[in-house]
């Protein structure tokens, strides 16, 4: 194991089981560039406060900059360090010698960890909003395709035929969900409250301000101006992980939404429904059954919802009943957090690809649109317009449907005389026009489009 | 079982097991006043569209108004109806006869349920923000008490002595958490998107607008102007419950925060810590051990975090992989939702009461402030100010602490000569001043207060 | 609030908010008869140890017996007591005066609660095994019906046609699951370790043994002989709730299994699949759409899985990180426990009813059995039997399927010459026989029936 | 990407996003040796049925054997294969050429996956039982140490002093928990029902039996005789993952138990309690505060409970509402399963190490044993033995405690005259003897040791 950031007080070596059990570098290396940004900001503070000369600052900055460039090229640090913060410190020492020992002045890993994690979240939520918007575009694109834009299909409640609806409205429902999710991510990212200066829990002796000047030039493509602030309550800062929970919570909602889209497409692409065909490039086969073309991508998306929920519970439970301030338990927030971002990001990307390939089976859908039940509600409105109270009209049509089933005859085939037995308001030539999907969907005026 | 809102099509009676299994009135009665508001808005729509005359509208409004007044007096409807919507419909029919049958024109329970649930959430989040603010005030009050406002205590990380901190900062951390939670509730409530017009899933034939005029005069104390909007995607509206999940998610975070406050107080009120005393009025005893005074309230608050997390999982899992649009599974969102609000609301209230009674044990706390370890970091800064690089200073003090433990002697008792063996920068008369809690907390400049 | 079991040490009254927040009688009244059994056993112990005379014992037993009879008639105690144990104590005092004060000798609510909860679990798991067996019988009955027993349907993987299978095997899969669940319940109930003698945590001064003699005669229909044992580790006994978690865990698995059966039936009863019809008595309708016949019972069963999972998390999280021994948090085990039993019990019952009514649509199923893909694996085996290595045969049939799709022609319609281009082993008159569901299912020899 | 086990039917290449999203080799490589055992058993079946000659069998067996040896040496397969089954198949083909193509005769990955996962569980639960037993031994060892075996400490309920108890009973409580957990693991492993012959879902044409002969000689150290059985319901076999859930459920209970032990030790090792000292080799320090010695190992154990619960929810939710039979979602059972075993196994090991180093601080504990409240219950029994009804005695002692607190005087310091005002049964010289931990613990006769 490499050198640690602590140990002077200890007279014994750490047990190897403990080193293995407590180390986090195998996952927190993902914070490497964010920790470097924190160090760059910290250098400015130390410099201003006179703890580092300009030359020392430059040396440290250059060393960090070269480390940052390694990451950009995909470098993954070795796992024989306790954590990423220790690794960076040890690398710095290799590069600039004992000058590196000054960098830890007036800061603590407790503060570094929460800083880097928040900055990671800031970057990751930003990226994810873009990825989610790409899926929105893909869905929009699908619904605007010439062959789809006026397509009507049976709308379902309880997975039973309900009323005809536009495909574009079906898809539009998912767009609405995703847009809400994006606005949730936006709220989150503007409330992360990224700070420096908490120390281990009690603050530090050095006033900290203006962290953000010129940080851009070093590394982040985005201007960080104003993003990083001095801490206001240092105990709260090092000890809370509500932002992690909040984010995994929102990602869980995204995953839930995607699991529903997946389920709809899985059902619609069965032999029995046959509403839609998924492109082979997005399906897989079977090692035993050569005919199989399975929607595995969609099934995994459905199943991954569980993984997200599990990550949420993992973070929530870990925080339950923890006394203030920092406790080592909190180290366990990172794997669920990273994993949640990675899964949802992959899901959004692979779905955007899959969505673009979907082909709707118009002839099969039209077959199912012949189900007279889909227009029963329109028949009720027909009677309501003839001044029959709604619930009475509902009962009349219910009985008519019953009659049609029991006698295995279509309503539009019934003679007018028979219709009038159900209600004398029925006029056959008016009614037969109602069994039309376009008339049905166009009659719905309550929606503000 | 009372009359249902459906059934014309059915030739058989519902199995009694099914009626029992599917009914929801035993909990959804809590939506009663919100459903009535929806009906009042719907009456305006029907009236404007010519489906109801002004006189009919008035009759229905009056009947609903009298029902509303019953609730205000604490009325709880009998459980022999399928759900609260059915109950209200049946009551209306008793009051205004067949005119009641017209009210269901162009609407569906799918829309009613989501409308009433959202309005419930709007009202409940509003109230909860106030309740949370009361706890904030109680905590602030406690920290501003004359005997508390300058109280310093050992700050903890890993439940081990870390550095001295102000009690007001400890308590301030909880205030920060609660304020974030309140801002989360606020974001939620302004994004509920309360709409009418979705019908069962496909919209209705009646244009809907201006729902909000004059609704205030009927029932809500608050002006609802502009709150209720026409639906924009009807399939999304009836089929999503992301707002329920989002709310239980935020309430889970509140419960997590409160569980931590509870844990701190439980530990602080042990015989061993004895930092704080909880008033007898907020404790309970034992049936066997007569000496006992237990912090049961705090333990329940700690434990209830689990209940909230469970409610969250319940709602999340229920929604996983549901095909669009409405499915009956969604009925199961209400118990977790109501239960979560009720628990968190009780917790906030009982805690506000308990907090006010807390008495800190200054003499015992001062005893623990004598632990020299609390000032070790200040010793490091002392050396850093004398130009020793931080990590080197850290190691020196670590060794000094070690020496002090091994030889069972206080650092401030060490002769200067011995101190200088650890670092020649040490000046004994400077150092002994550092073991002072007030000097320690005042030296922390990094916090923006 | 009624008299408490504690309080001598307290000089203040409990705050009403606290009484409301901490009381449990609104749900723990369900333990009433089990607490009475515990008291009856405790009377025997006290009598044997000389703390009660025979006459006193009889008086107390009679008083408890009359309380027990009230419950049998459905009595629900008023909620103005702290908990059910306090209620029983207060009722006893009304009946036998100060003699009641002796009953609490050498016991504690900590012990009473865990005793009564375990006995509840013992009784409830016993009953649930029977209920689950009734569902097994119902499924078996369905599969043995004359019209079903030889019914073959398309088997699904990934919700895509895989290979033909017997309906009885499909249903048999659910029977296998339920039988495993029943064996889990059995394991649980024999490992509950129901004890007395733990006191609050440290044991009591009275030796306890032979609790079980003659308890049967009082109340339980079942002989309790040997069920109740003296405690072996009293700290463990009052402080663990692993049995609660274990039970909710098993019930969650049951709920998961039932959610899958529900999903299969929901999908199979869509208009598009139309494999099965659910009886009207087990369906519900719509308030807007008169044609609807919805499988609400099945949807609720699907959704309730989430409730069970939530209850499990609730109990698990509550127990996380609790110091020994008893903490008040543990009171929160009961609602999730009771709720889980009640839900699963209802599900099993309503499903047993629903299952009996199912009618399979043979003609529609046969239509789907014509899908040639279902026999592709049999074609592979055909080639394997002609000495073509399996994976090679798999590829050949894969290409054949591809050709058949691309040219929109059935494999059995292909001329022999063309078939031979895929493999010269093909003999058309042999192959055409393979597209037969009965031949397909009968060819599977690997299953030990 | 390497060659797949399917694809003949596909005319397009799989999208790279899909390959990345669906592949599982990065974790299911852990099943490699178990999949090889399955293949060895399958070879015997194919050989017996005449699909493989003895020579072919031997060739395949040797090739598998050499692969198995590679794993033993720690080989980890490259991640450019879809899954471990595909990797093994491709490796075989490299070794034995087209003969490898015959091995997949009459089997499916659906069956392979569940077989290998169950065998993994069988091996892992076996190992874990041993690891748990080592912790039991370590705890037993600690409690039998000369300096510990008669140590008495304050027993806690509600984290408040309750009654004196033996340390060995405190530790014994954890032994009881672990023993129950071990018996749960044992039940599980004997009920795994490891089978072959399910095919994809419908069985295969080859009769399968006697899988177990001679498998031992190849690889498992343990005799597998009788472990592997022919499948009885093939649809159930490929489609259920209840065993995975059941196992993670039991592991969650273990993690819960360990989180409690961790919490007790964290609290006991605070400066304020100071009951116990954890060896430095099992603690870590701080990068800022040089004095720190933190119980990080215990904190991680406490926090990991959340991870286990999350894994449980992940698996449970993934299975919710899945139609029969196999769905790709099920692939997501493996990461939570493996992760749960690995965490709990590490926890048990590191705890066993830590436990052995614990040193109890007898003098500090004795100080706290002077708290008179600990003996209040013994005072009650004293009065009960003098024929005062229990609850009356409880009230008397409660008042006595109150008096003692209010007047800040110890009960044993009170003059007899004053004592008699509380009860004339009090005899001072008898009472003063009761404030003795040894007398207190020895008076508890109810525990069957």
Image (tube, coloured by chain):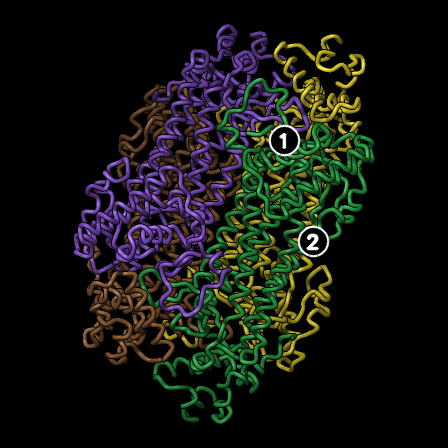
Chain colours: A green, B yellow, C brown, D purple
Where C391 sits versus B339, above or below? below
Query: Few, some or many C-alpha atoms within 10 Å of disc 2 (few <14, some 14-19, many ≥20)?
Result: some
Chain letter of disc 2 in the image: B
- Residue drawn where x is 71% and y is 40% of the image: A38
Where A230 sits versus A385, above or below? above
Frontmost residue, A273 versus D64: D64
User: In the picture, which quadrant includes the N terminus of chain C?
Assistant: top right
Frontmost residue, B306 versus C207: B306
Left or right position of C415 against A314: left
Question: Does the rendering let one see residue A173?
Answer: yes
Q: What residue did someone put label 2 on?
A: B186
In the rendered image, which quarter is residue D141 located in? top left
- Label 1 and label 2: CA atoms lie apart by 28 Å
Q: What residue did someone put label 1 on?
A: B265
Query: Residue C66, image x and y in percent?
Result: 37, 38
Tell me how many marks there are: 2
User: In the picture, which quadrant includes the C terminus of chain C?
Assistant: bottom left
Frontmost residue, A411 versus D386: A411
Left or right position of D87 against C109: left
Disc marking residue C334: none
- Residue drawn where x is 38% and y is 31% of the image: C39
Query: Residue B344, image x and y in percent?
Result: 61, 45
Q: Are marks 1 and 2 on the same chain?
A: yes
Left or right position of B285 against A89: left
Query: Residue D149, image x and y in percent?
Result: 42, 14
* Label 2: which secondary element: helix
Where D413 sits versus C168, above or below? above
């Amino acid at each position: 194991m490499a050198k640690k950031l602590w140990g002077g007080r200890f007279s014994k070596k750490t047990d190897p089981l403990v080193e293995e059990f407590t180390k986090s570098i195998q996952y927190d290396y993902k914070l490497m560039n964010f920790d470097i940004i924190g160090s760059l900001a910290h250098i400015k503070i130390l410099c201003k406060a006179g703890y580092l000369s300009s030359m020392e600052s430059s040396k440290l900055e250059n060393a960090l900059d070269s480390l940052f460039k390694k990451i950009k090229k995909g470098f993954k640090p070795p796992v024989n360090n306790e954590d990423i913060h220790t690794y960076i410190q040890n690398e710095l020492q290799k590069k600039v010698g004992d000058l590196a020992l000054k960098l830890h002045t007036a800061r603590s890993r407790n503060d570094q960890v929460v800083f880097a994690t928040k900055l990671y979240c800031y970057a990751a939520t930003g990226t994810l909003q873009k990825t989610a918007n790409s899926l929105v575009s893909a869905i929009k694109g699908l619904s605007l395709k010439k062959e789809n834009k006026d397509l009507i299909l049976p709308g379902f409640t309880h997975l039973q035929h309900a009323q005809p609806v536009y495909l574009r409205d079906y898809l539009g429902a998912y767009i609405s969900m995703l847009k809400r999710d994006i606005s949730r991510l936006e709220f989150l990212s503007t409330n992360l409250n990224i700070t420096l200066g908490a120390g281990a829990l009690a603050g530090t002796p050095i006033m900290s301000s203006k962290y953000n000047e010129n940080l851009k030039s070093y590394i982040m493509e985005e201007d960080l101006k104003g993003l990083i602030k001095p801490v206001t309550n240092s105990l709260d800062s090092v000890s809370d992980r509500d932002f992690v929970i909040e984010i995994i919570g929102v990602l869980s909602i995204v995953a839930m939404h995607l699991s529903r889209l997946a389920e709809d497409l899985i059902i619609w692409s069965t032999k029995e429904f046959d509403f839609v065909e998924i492109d082979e490039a997005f399906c897989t086969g079977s090692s035993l059954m050569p005919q199989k073309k399975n929607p595995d991508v969609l099934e995994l998306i459905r199943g991954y919802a569980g993984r997200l929920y599990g990550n949420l519970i993992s973070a929530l439970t870990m925080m339950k009943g923890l006394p203030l301030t920092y406790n080592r338990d909190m180290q366990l927030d990172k794997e669920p957090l990273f994993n949640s971002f990675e899964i949802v990001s992959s899901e959004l990307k692979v779905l955007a690809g899959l969505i673009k390939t979907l082909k709707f089976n118009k002839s099969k859908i039209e077959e199912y649109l012949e189900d007279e039940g889909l227009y029963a509600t329109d028949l009720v409105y027909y009677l309501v317009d003839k001044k029959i109270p709604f619930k009475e009209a509902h009962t009349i049509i219910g009985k008519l449907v019953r009659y049609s089933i029991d006698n295995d005859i279509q309503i539009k085939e019934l003679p007018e005389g028979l219709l009038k037995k159900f209600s004398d308001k029925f006029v056959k030539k008016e009614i037969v026009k109602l069994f039309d999907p376009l008339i049905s969907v166009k009659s719905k005026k309550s929606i503000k489009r």
